[in-house]
Image (tube, coloured by chain):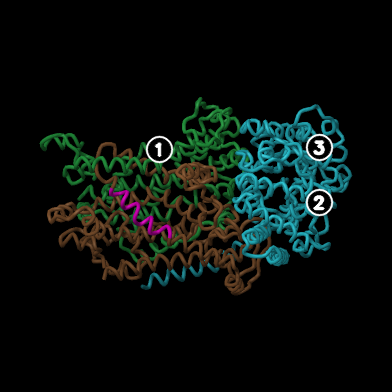
Chain colours: A green, B cyan, C brown
Amino acid sequence: MSTAEKTPAPARAGVRERRRITDEHGRRVRGWELVLRYVLLLAVLALTVGPFLWQLSTSLKGPTEDIFTSPPRFLPSRPTLHNYERVSETIPVWDYVLNSLKVALANVVTNCVGAALAGYALARLRYRGRRAATLVFILAMLVPAEGIIIAQFTTMRELGLNNTLLAVVLPGSVGALNVLLMRNAFLNVPYEIEEAAYVDGANVWQRFWRVALPSVRGTLAVVAIFAFMFSWDDFLWPLIVLSDPSKYTLTIGLNYLHGTFANDERLVAAGTIIAVAPLIILFACLQRYFFRGVGEGAVKG
Amino acid sequence: MPLSRRALATAAVIAVVLPLSACGSGDDTGGSSDASGKVEGDITFQTWNLRANFKSYFEGVIAGFEKKYPDAHVKWVDQPAENYADKISADAAGGTLPDVVNVSPDLVAPLAKAGLALDLDKSASKYKKEYLPGAWASHQIPGVKGTYAFPWYLNTGPLFYNKALFEKAGLSPDQPPKTYDDLFADALKISDRTDGKVATLANVPTIEDFGRYGVPLMNKEGTGFTFNDAKGVELLTKYKELYKVKALDPQALTATPESSGRKFLTEAVAMNPGSALDLGNFKKQAPHLYKNIGITDQITSTGHVNMYVMGVMVNSRTKHTPAAVAFAHYVTDAEHQMSFAKKVAIFPSTAGSLEDPYFTKEDGTDETRVRVAAAKSLKTAVNYTPVLFSDQMKTELGNSVARALQGKQSPQEALDAAVKACDRLLQQQG
Amino acid sequence: MATSTVTRSQGPGRPDRPGPLGRLGRLARPGGAAGRTPPPAVRVRRQLVTSPWLFAAPGLLITAVFILYPFVSTVINSFTDRRTLLPGHYVGLANFRELLHDDMFWIGLRNSTVYVLGVVPALVILPLLLALLVQRNIPGITFFRSAFYTPVVASVVVVGLIWVWLLDERGLVNSLLEAVGVGKVGFLSDQWLLLFSAMTVTVWKGLGYYMIIYLAALANVPRELHEAAAVDGAGAVRRFLTVTVPAVRSTMVLVAALSSVAAFKVFSEVYLMAGPNGGPAGEDTTLVMLVQRTGTGLSGRVGYASALSLVVFVVAVVLMLLVLRADRREES
């Protein structure tokens, strides 16, 4: 997959006879098969993206347009951004976005650093107790979050951190799943590369920073996206730990909106779009790295 | 694996030591119950989902208070509607409860039992006469001496119905049901004549419905529930009939107040309780419904409509008792309740306020008509929901009602089970 | 032990390299890592003794303080009758004994189990098919891949709101069904349909996530295998069964393990669709919902809810071990 991605398809095809569409193994894809593929792709597309578009369409419908008609009308008759304006009049939505952004970016940094370091230790460094350390992360993954949230809150209070954005960040700052993801990525890097660096006299830190880390950039991108998503979506924990409205994150803000205007589908829809859009944009920007990270194994194949 | 064993040992040590250290902390930061000192210090005031609509109102109230008492400073926080109890319980358990908290009677009960709410009969009895006697009593807890919150705003509302749907079913759009018998009869007719397409009710009966139907909910001592008597069974049996023919919406078993509101909005359901606030909503969102809206009184067998009560509680551990009590009173005094009532369709709980022309004079609009009627009915209104009825009990009752409606249990069996479960939860509350 | 099916089918000489996530599932198995053939670079092991712990320290610290420590206090609470605002007393195994007689507990256990049985097969198979569909580098494929991932990106609350509206009695799905002549279906009122609807949402939201994991694994399937099979005249279906499935088998196990643990701990989807009470008469309550319902709020029974959490945890561990054991048995 990634080989194909690196070489633009037309260029590669040019080497062969004519421009044509090939599969990941360089074989020609037959016409009917291609049509079938696109039909299936479009069908799945309708299923996955359709609901979001319906929400978007609802958010663009004006106050005079009946949104409960049946059969449903997919396109707003007179699209308007009025609902978005109302959202920002009702709640300081941009402050909330900023708070969410701070928390999410902090989470991305701590997860990338913490998970990469821990993952490297688990995968590469041979030391006693490594298995126990691995087990700690696996167990952490299995703990049901809803069951420990109050205990987490009391812990946070004992540390004097409640009602701070730091408290929102900390519990998820080095996710167990991310550590295990990084561990697996490092396990996939051939030992020979690091061995060569070792022979050249590189110490642990240098081998980690200059050799190992660059070869798992893709997984790092995956971890970054997971961390961002997780923190952007988190609801119950920030709600419990924050009490000062000026520190609220977007999910709590939206809950406000939903609580106050539960019956105004348009407003709620606009709010949800505001919540989803940054993630979709972020993902669209990073997806190249993301999919490369996912296919990392093959890069060196 | 020597190290794994060591890790285990470490874990065991952590397990034993840490929780002990956790137990040792906190819980001793007590405040005094004496409210007679100087009004000074920084206090925090927490409201329940009021920021979105009433930001300027509360900022004005706080500014007024700080002007009156220059040494006091109030920080206002507002919490979202959902998970409010979770938020309060986390704060209460963690010792971070704000000084002045917006509560409802069922929220204040566990706080008072845990000694976290200030007894106003001791600290603020001089204000008692400013409030309607019934409202003042609404934050008293059976089995516990004292009053634990200032009464704040009250709310009640009419029953809305959809005239077009009534007409479609061959009922007179100007003769809405007035009694429970009428209601059940009309509901059966509507579902019969629309082949079950139009339901009349969207909600299963809750504890307040049992109360309104005249079912005794608790014994006098407040030590046990009694809603499984003949009257309770009768109400549930009626609802079961309605459910069978889809006169009670088939989705009622999973409905929330907002989902049933939406059913009414989409004209899938013919009747829904509401408040004056809803009228604007209908106008904006469902113009067709608004044209056909009918407004009638809440149906009761007792002659007393149901009301919701909000209160303002003072944290017993506040470091600035005089300021916290003074502010809680300031927010809930006649002047500020009145100005709040003029902002939104709620009603003041202060003595005499409901005699204000704002609540007695009609001007021909639907909004005013609803307001005047509600204010009138509030004079005899009752908060049916028992103060001790916790969320867990609501769930038990809801589940039993659902089992009865589905025919898995007879109404009598279901209510017996609910009473048993609620009594057990009541005892555990201690 | 270290040689998974992937490596074996790749033949000797290939580096031991399962997908990026391929080893995750193996960790919980005793003896898993110990049996691993020592890598060529044994020399690398001679480190400064402290550095590995320094590397792992931030992660371990955070996990210990914010996950394991609260969990340990949960374990301790499970032997008390603690309530949200009142301190508890030691009650021995009373909470666990009460569990056995609590109808809601059995309903929760049933629903969580049903959820695993319903969701896991779908999440093991469908994303694999989807990965095969988007694997080929045809024009526009990156768009499709990203688009299929959007449900993963959206928050579960948003997803819940969207689907409740779609499946409403007057929602899009029902009006389409009525147009086809099927008539209205009570997706959100029937006990089993509700659970099924929630499962649909879980699968819908999980498709993209597991698709990505499969894509990674598929990238590791050597093309020679496909080519050899093609030369042998194997059709698409046979190639899928004889080449693809064995090659990604360890990933399928991983997906099964991850998705079954997640499915057993399901909360949000059912909570959002069936409501906080868990559907009609609470019949759709899952175990974690029960934990949340009994343990939170001002009258929350923290002790009893802690006992419930502990049961959830133990079952999740057992589930993971079972999936991995099944894997090992098949392998040998």
Chain bearing tag 3 is: B
Queried whether the magenta region covers residue C126, the answer comes back as yes
The residue wearing badge 2 is B301
Queried whether the magenta region covers residue B164, the answer comes back as no
**From which residue to which does the magenta span run?**
C118-132
Image quarter where the N terminus of chain B lies is bottom left
- Element carrying mark 1: helix
Type of amino acid under label 1: Leu
Q: Is residue C24 left or right of residue A11?
A: right
Q: Quadrant of residue C26?
A: bottom left
Image quarter where the C terminus of chain B lies is bottom right
Q: Is residue B415 left or right of residue B379?
A: left
Chain bearing tag 2 is: B
| Disc 2 versus disc 3: nearer the observer | 2
Relative image position of residue A67 (x, y in whole percent): 55, 34
Q: Nearer the viewer, residue A263 or A90?
A: A263
Q: CA distance from mark 3 to mark 1?
A: 54 Å
Relative image position of residue B197 (x, y in whole percent): 60, 45
